[in-house]
Amino acid sequence: MFLNEDFVKRIRRNRMAMAGLGIVAILFCVAISANQLAPYPPSRIDTANILAPPTWKHLLGTDVLGRDVLSRIIYGAGVSLSVGFVAVGISTLIGMILGALSGYYSGLIDRIVMRFVDVMLCFPSFFLILAVIAFVGPSIWNIMIVIGVTSWMGVARLVRAEFLSIRERDFVQAAISQGASDARIIFLHILPNAMAPVLVAATLGIASAVLIESGLSFLGIGVQPPDPSWGNMLTEGKDNIEIAWWLSLFPGMAILITVMGYNMLGEGIRDSLDPRLRR
Amino acid sequence: MRFLVKRIALMIPTLIGITIISFTVMKMAPGDPTSLMTDLNPNMNEEAVKRIRAHYGLDQPWSIQYFKWLRNMAVLDFGRSFAPDNRPVIDKIAERIPITLLINILSMVLIFSVAIPIGVMSAVKQDSMFDRVSSLIVFIGFAIPTFWLALLMMILFGVKLDWLPISGFRSLNYSHLSSVGRILDIGKHLIMPIFVSAFGGLAGMSRYMRSNMLEVIRQDYITTARAKGLDERTVIFKHAFRNALLPVITILGLSVPGLIGGSVIFETIFAIPGMGQLFYQSVMMRDYPTIMGILVIGAALTLVGNLLADLLYSWADPRIRVSD
């Protein structure tokens, strides 16, 4: 298994990974304790303070309905976290299954799966996602599923490559010669040893899922108002671009910091897993 | 030539795969396309619904529907738009493609002309101040949502400084301008969209160029070149740079779907009448034939982009042709 002492020691010394982990941990705390942290309920309308610029009362200003921007950003953290994790969970699962089948059995299955990957990669992913959403309708669950179903190709390729090389190693050959079943070899012998690059890809995948969700919500086909999401808050920012810069600036910063956190963590894990891969 | 034929032959199964997936997407809709016309129409009776379904061939089994759809697709017949104008989908797409391609090609040029020098510089002066700063910018570039970047630029250059127009493709007085004025006008409208669409690619490309260059510099032939006393400029630009540039061609092909997909976002934000905006509008009003048409054409464009990149690569690197 890759989570050995060596890895832990290296990752603790890796400043980038630790900074990323810090950001992600803070986000988790914010998302979980949104009720306690947010100064106002996210949908409370305050008609006396419509489009108010940042003040001590409303640290990040208010929107067209007088709702507190800071509170909505805090509640939005949960949305982006859950979309990121569920979507990546789905894509990683699909990618691992198809990659494992393809790498272990090779032959016809391999050819079909890899062709499928090629075809999926031909679609501009944003087009495919939007098209599916147009047909099934926008909701947070549909978005998670659609992002997951359209972003598993990288993981499938990684897992396949790992399987191809690990299958030839002595301990796997020994298991085969002892008559172990295919399932036992795949799940017990090969898969645990193929997890390292998957972990990196999944961490980076959360970052891109957060970006996609915010883009979809921004276009109005993601998380639907009045539920707060960083993306749909930016839609209001665009609608009021001439008068209320704070509606555009702050939610975008939340997205930027979140995505950077996952990217840093992912890159840090990669460096710690295999220092030779460092670029 | 044999290489070309082989490459094109390999595209056919992929193309068929694209149509199968597109068709599956279309069939995921709850109900069917006719429900949009029939559900809220009080004049519809069961008989009329049946007739409409038969008219669109929806009463036939899936496999038959697929092959009929495929046959239409082969002659670029995507049907008529559900939008009020009811025009053939292919016409609507055809008038939108040039502007999307123009923006994408220009942003590709921008990506290459900026990212390659940055990548080479960072690699040659690894760990220098320049390398650190550019690495930091690249890192932010990977994480920044393009639509947010667009908003910030609109606030700064459009609203606060009032230097650039924030929406549309040409000004209202366009028809009164001289031909030079027209080009300048369009140029002014396109600066922000092109920059925004290029930004993400800039980060990726400069990073990629940097790691290629670092890889090449470690090769034996670079050591040889240095050992025989060539000056550093010749080593870097003549020996290292040209080899590091080769894999970039592949990225050219791979970045096509990202650029085309990204056009939905920036064309919507900047109100540019391209294919991305058409796609967004079609999604919002559930114009199924147009959605399907753009989906298939977008994938086909990617395929063509990959083919061009492959051909370019085999032309630039004789090793590919020989081993094939």
Image (cartoon, rainbow, N blue to C red):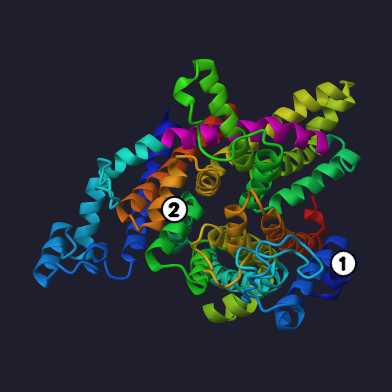
- Pointer 1 chain: A
Q: Return the residue nearer the eye: B173 or B8.
A: B173
Examine the structure image and report whether residue B102 is included in the region drawn in magenta. Answer: yes
- Pointer 2 chain: A
Q: Return the residue nearer the eye: A117 or B83.
A: B83
Looking at numbered disc 2 in the image, what kind of residue is underneath it?
Answer: Val
Image spot of residue B309 (x, y percent):
53, 35
For label 1, the crowd category at 10 Å Cα-Cα, with few meaning under 14, some 14 to 19 and many 20 or more, is some
Majority secondary structure of the magenta segment? helix
Which of the two labelled residues, at mark 1 and mark 2, occupies the earlier sequence position?
1
Q: How many marks?
A: 2
Looking at numbered disc 1 in the image, what kind of residue is underneath it?
Answer: Arg
Residue at image coords 76%, 40%: B210
Disc marking residue B88: none
Residue at image coords 46%, 51%: A123
Task: Report if residue B43 is visible in the image.
Answer: yes
Tag 2 secondary structure: helix
Query: In the picture, which quadrant includes the N terminus of chain A?
Result: bottom right
Image spot of residue A175 (x, y percent):
62, 78
Q: Return the residue nearer the eye: A216 or B67.
A: A216
Q: Quadrant of residue B255?
A: top right
Q: Return the residue nearer the eye: A19 or B6.
A: A19
Q: Which residues make up the magenta segment?
A: B97-122
Residue at image coords 77%, 62%: A54
Disc marking residue A10: 1
Task: Report if residue A172 is visible in the image.
Answer: no
**Dot 2 corresponds to which residue?**
A119
Say above or below: B48 vs B68: below
Say above or below: A250 vs A123: below
Residue at image coords 54%, 19%: B181
Q: CA distance from mark 1 to mark 2?
A: 39 Å
Tag 1 secondary structure: helix
